[in-house]
Image (cartoon, helix red, strand yellow):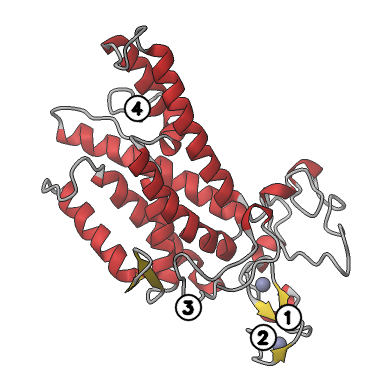
Amino acid sequence: MATCDECGRNENMPYHCQHCGGTYCGEHRLPENHGCPGLDDWNDPSGIFDSGFDDGVDNPGDRSSSGRLSGVFDTGVGGPLGFFRGNMTFVFLALMFVTFALQYATQFILAPAGSLFLTPSSREIYQALFTISPEHPLYVWTWFTSIFAHGGLVHLLFNAIVIYFFGQQVERYVGSRDFALLFLGSGVLAGLGHVAVELLRGGELTPALGASGAALAILGVLTVLNPDLRVYLYFLIPVPIWAITAFYAFVSVSGVLGVQILPGVADAAHLVGLVVGLAYGQHVKDRVKARDRLQFGGGRGGGGMGGRGRGPF
Ligand SMILES: [Zn+2]
Ligand SMILES: [Zn+2]
């Protein structure tokens, strides 16, 4: 038994809209009939990660390549990119962990035999692979690799937890393609923001790495869409998401102005990520109906890598 998000009617066999994640009665199950926030994306023929309504019962596979310029970018049921639909959060998380393993492997290969420490020249190679550096801002690949690389396990796990819980929400709200663009775009801009501030500030130039910029962009989007969303800090303490965002904004602005509160953190990158997220949230606000609550550590069954059958939290 569930209630329709559109008309409130009780429904024994509710439908879940794959695009917006809402629950609907038979009458309102189609995106057209519930003012689905993702309808624009759904109709976008060039959608790379098009995540439309999965109406697998009535017209299985109907949305496959017919009428499209190229079947290559088709993420409909059975399309070549079908797996990525609704799963970009997990793709990015996987890339973070794979990159972390590659960092260790690279370190092992580059270090002199019997040592765990890199020589100055091998350190340069390592940094040119995994960090975005103010000394080499035109190593374009590092704009992307630095998003997925991390400075340690705690750093990795913290970002992974934020992305796991909040990323799925944002991905469902805006669609997988836009989510992917947001993630990569905010990550690149955060890295370049760090580079710019380091160069302006002068002195010792430190490289940066990590998905924090993208994670804070995700946090920013959710804050605009639903500022009162309850987040359970340490799985126990309910805090509205706006308070967490305000805390990070304060810490980041303070750091950029020269008063670092959290040591070893790229404050400029955090600030850029947050601003990108808040701006993007404002941009998509009209077409998105946000959910009320997100409870860390509980609530949702199923889902996971399969990405199908997502219910409300
Ligand atoms: Zn209804
Ligand atoms: Zn919908």
Q: Amino acid at mark 1?
A: Pro
Task: Tell me if residue 114 comes above or below residue 224 in the rendering.
Answer: above
Residue plotted at (73% across, 88% down): 11
Label 1 and label 3: CA atoms lie apart by 19 Å
Q: Amino acid at mark 3?
A: Asp
Q: Residues within 10 Å of mark 4 (few under 14, many from 20)?
A: some
The reply to whether callout 4 and callout 2 are in contact (CB within 8 Å) is: no
Q: Measured from the top left, where is residue 237 in percent x and y?
A: 32, 72
Dot 4 falls on a residue whose secondary structure is loop
Which quarter of the rendered picture does the N terminus lie within? Answer: bottom right
Residue plotted at (34% across, 56% down): 275
Q: Which of marks 3 and 1 precedes in the sequence?
A: 1
Residue plotted at (21% across, 28% down): 205
Label 1 and label 2: CA atoms lie apart by 7 Å
Nearer to us in this view, 182 or 106 = 106
Q: Quadrant of ligand 1?
A: bottom right
Q: Which of marks 2 and 4 precedes in the sequence?
A: 2
Residue 70 appears anywhere in the view:
no
The label on residue 4 is: 2
Residue 97 appears anywhere in the view:
yes
**Residue labelled 2 has its Cβ within 8 Å of some atom of ligand 1:** yes
Q: Amino acid at mark 2?
A: Cys
Q: Which of marks 2 and 1 precedes in the sequence?
A: 2
Label 4 and label 2: CA atoms lie apart by 51 Å
